[in-house]
Amino acid sequence: MNTTDSRVELSFDVAGSPSIPESLRERALDRLAGRLVDGVLTVVSSEQRSQLRNRETARERLAEILRSATAPDPPRRRPTRPTAGAKRRRLDAKTRRGAVKRLRGRPDE
C-alpha cells in the first residue's frame, strides 16, 4: 500500500493563534512544549487508505490534543486522616498476622 500519497500533515500555530484565549494558550504551550517546533503543533496521519479519511483522523487527533492540553488541572486531593475504626482494624490484622508467623517457629523445648 502506498501511504505516502494518502499521508496528511496538519499544522496548527498554537503560539500565534488568535482563536485561543491567552490563559489557555499559556497552558497549552507549557503542556505541549515537547511536541512544539517554534510554537507550531504538527499532527501526521497515514493509517487510512484514503487521504480524506486521513484528514478527518488528523483533525480529530489535533482537536483531542488541544482539548487535553487546555483542560483545567484536576482538583487537589484534600489530605484526610484514617478513622479510629480503620486504625483498630489495621492493628488487629497486624496482631493476627504476627501470631500466625510466631506459630511457624520451632516449638520451645
Image: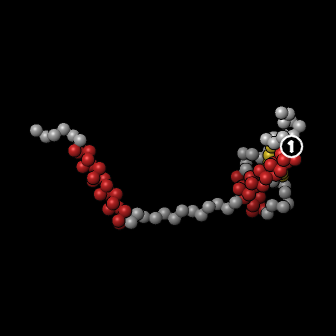
Q: Residue at x 29, y 50 (%)?
A: 97
Above or below, 106 against 27 in this view is above
76 sits left or right of 88 in the view = right
Where's residue 34, x and y in %? 72, 45
> Is any part of residue 39 visible from this angle?
no
Quadrant of the frame with the C terminus: top left
Closer-to-camera residue (41/33) = 41
Where's residue 69, x and y in %? 72, 55
Closer-to-camera residue (27/12) = 12
> Is any part of residue 55 visible from this angle?
yes
Which residue in the structure is indicated by mark 1?
A: 50
User: Residue 45's image quarter?
Assistant: top right
99 sits left or right of 70 in the view = left
Where's residue 40, x and y in %? 82, 48
Quadrant of the frame with the N terminus: top right
Q: Secondary structure at mark 1?
A: loop
Where's residue 12, x and y in %? 83, 51
User: Residue 46's image quarter?
Assistant: top right
Q: Residue at x 16, y 40 (%)?
A: 107
Closer-to-camera residue (60/27) = 60
Structural crowding at the residue carrying mark 1, measured as other residues with C-alpha within 10 Å and reported as few (<14), some (14–19) or many (≥20): some
Coloration of the structure image:
secondary structure
Residue farthest along the left direction in this orientation = 109
> How many discs mark residues in the rendered view?
1
> Which amino acid type is marked by label 1?
Ser
Q: Residue at x 80, y 49 (%)?
A: 57
